[in-house]
Image (tube, rainbow, N blue to C red):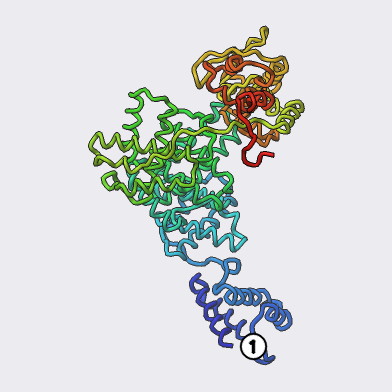
Amino acid sequence: MVHFDNNVLILEDNLRDFHYLPKVIHRERNHLDNLKAYMNANGISVFSLDMAIGWCDEKITSSEHRPCILSINRLNDVYEHGRILASHLRLFGELSDAFQDAISDYLEHISSYTDGTREWYRRVCTHFCLFAQHHNTDTPDGISYELVKNYHAFVSEAGTYRHYETQISNFLVYLGENHKCSTGISACMFYGKFGRVFLASDLSDNDRATLEKIKNHNASTSTADAFHASISSFRKELLAIGYDMQGSAGTVCYLNWLYVFLASADMGYCRQAADLWAKAAAGSVFDPKYIKQAYRSFGLYDDYVSKGTVFPGKYNSSNPNYYDQIPLWCREKVDRFVNDRNREGKAESTIRQNRSHISKFCLFLVSEGLESFDELTPELVKKSVLQNAGLAIGTRWSYNYGVRVFLISMEIRNELRSGFHLAVPRLCSDEEKIVTVMGQNDIDSIVAYCQNAATPLGLRDAAILKLGMNTAFRSIDVVSLKVTDIDWKNRMIRIIQSKTKVEHIHPVDVDTLNSIFLYLKEGRPKKAGCDNVFVSSKVPFGPLGTGACINAMQRAGSTVTQFHCLRRTYATDTLRAGATIAETAELLGQSDTNSVHKYTSLDSDRMKLCPLSMGEMGISLEGRYAHV
């Protein structure tokens, strides 16, 4: 019975911690002493819940039955969990003057409510304040995020106080507005009810160290409360460009959850901290499969803050923008490098790619603990290159090139010792790729999909795929196609090719034109915000990215999803049909025939005509090895 006696002592200590009266604890002891005497008399050495309840039902009077059952359940909690669970506890005690004054002021604030409602609020707020006092907090300004998190755990375990949390959240809003506690505390209480809270203290040790570095590097940013105040105006902007109420709420919810995290860390908004939160909170606050929606929300908000509006069509990738994550000491160098490249007249796409790779390089340096480029070594440069060993050769070459020219620019300015760029190797020479074309099964699958298209998305896919198959337009030219580019009467399309900037006029068959017309009539949103033929099927109905062409091939069931493969197939089929190389180049919009020659190797019928007779060349096999 040693365990029994020890657990009874633990039970009594728990009740004292929650300020139970001595007479209640004494009654608890009497019930358990009677149970112990019963167990000794019947030779029972091990406590069990069923045995104890059976004894209570048989031996205890009706007036004492309920408190006796409660005592047994509390003892069972101690046996199983080492403490009394919240479901078998009540909060008692005398409120501090500070909490009493806060509740009185709040009840005065809601004086328009009925007496019954105000009494209900008094009980609810008292319950929370008593819990705070049990956790050594006697004033409203001492209420912490950890305290709120512990209260959520307490009421969840109790099961009977979950409906308190919304009313307590309103009480905390009042305290925050009157500067009696942090304004983020009320949001923590409200979102915690739905399991949407992830605090800075919940981070792993490594992530907590990273957050501290981010906080130090962004010490000049605004507060979490300023970030929270901007969320409502951001949502109004979303509504103004065509988002509905549900869509805008879904977008800003990630920002509201992020606000609680930032407030608990006592820091303002910055993209690095937002991305860190998203990665850490995925799986607890939201499903990991929605992490790209969180990144999208951050990207839209970044544009709103920096440019005063949002650009929904920009964010189609699940990957965060590397540039937005780098600290200020890196950003200054990157911005200056980008300005230099602009003055050199480099293409926007080249500059954007360079900035992305250099930002990734900077993030690597931050992860290695660097706080300035003065700490950079050739060994670290080499290590950053080796981290990309598993990537495609083209991606690695592009990364190395961007880092190399960035280091050269810093060497020219005497910000680095000469020769740092030599730590970045050159990877590969020119390569020749094998031409791939569509197989007949894939073509049949696409044709069948186009014939059965009926939904707005299906009609858009059909028009895109037929343009790819019957005009060989590149994906960028398909999604950039304007309504005014189509000459319906003469069945021609005129475009300025995005890749070459050369005008290209191509004849279009009736079936393809019919598919485009059907999409414009029945599939294209009526409130599209641009004059592109193909637009997004979701608000704000802006231009598409080239990924829409890949998605169309996937939905059509093609095993080949590279849209450019339709262009290669068109070129190959044209040559097989008897067209000359020059005619094929003209249909493809090429200014010369060099890029068309590679398609001739796929014309197997004509390739059979190429070999020369050995006899005609005077070459005899007679007398040679293995000749019969």
> Whole-percent x and y of residue 502?
51, 15
The residue depicted at 43 percent of the width and 33 percent of the height is 353
The residue depicted at 38 percent of the width and 36 percent of the height is 402
Q: Nearer the viewer, residue 492 or 130?
A: 492
> Whole-percent x and y of residue 547?
58, 31
Q: Residues within 10 Å of mark 1 (few under 14, many from 20)?
A: few
> Whole-percent x and y of residue 78?
57, 75
SS class, disc 1:
loop
User: Is residue 569 at all visible to an observer of this figure?
Assistant: no
Q: Is residue 402 left or right of residue 171?
A: left
Q: Nearer the viewer, residue 80 or 467?
A: 467
Residue type highlighted by circle 1: Ser
How many numbered marks are there?
1
User: Is residue 195 at all visible to an observer of this figure?
Assistant: yes
User: Which residue is label 1 attached to?
Assistant: 45
**Residue furthest toward the front?**
623
Q: Quadrant of residue 37?
A: bottom right
The residue depicted at 42 percent of the width and 61 percent of the height is 137
Q: Is residue 556 left or right of residue 305?
A: right
Q: Is residue 221 left or right of residue 229?
A: left
